[in-house]
Amino acid sequence: MLSLARLRLGIGLLWLTNTCFNKCVEKRYKESELNMGENSCIDRCVSKYWHVTNLIGQLLGSGRPPM
């Protein structure tokens, strides 16, 4: 059971990484480091993902129907 939970977490992190990277980083790399705008975008993207994940977990855990 633990390995299934780890697999799900790994898949979730892979999805998060791909989604935020594709959304925030330009296809043509101009620099070897992320610029300030890309860093901010990735930070917001990851923050929103975890916020929504926590909300869903709370709703499912409480047994309340979705809003």
Image (cartoon, rainbow, N blue to C red):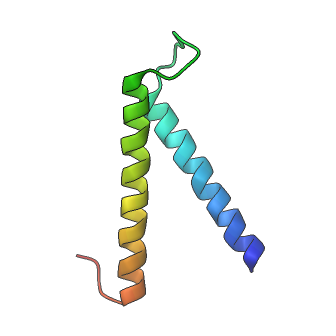
- The C terminus lies in quadrant: bottom left
Of the 4 image quadrants, the one containing the N terminus is bottom right
Residue shown at 70%/66% (left/top)?
6
Name the image quarter holding residue 24.
top left
* Residue at 38%, 34% in the rendered image: 41
Q: Position of residue 37 (x, y in %)?
A: 36, 25
Along the line of sight, the residue nearer the viewer: 19 or 40: 40
Number of marks present in the image shown: 0
Residue 2 percent across, percent down from the top left? 74, 76
**Residue that appears at 59% across and 15% down:** 32
At x 56%, y 40%, the residue is 18
41 on left or right of 2? left
Q: Residue furthest bottom?
A: 63
Farthest residue, direction top: 30
x, y percent for residue 55: 35, 70
Instruction: Say whether residue 11 is left or right of residue 43.
Output: right
Is 35 above or below relative to 52?
above
Q: Position of residue 17 (x, y in %)?
A: 56, 43
Report whether 17 appears left or right of 4: left
Location of residue 56 with respect to 13 vertically, above or below: below
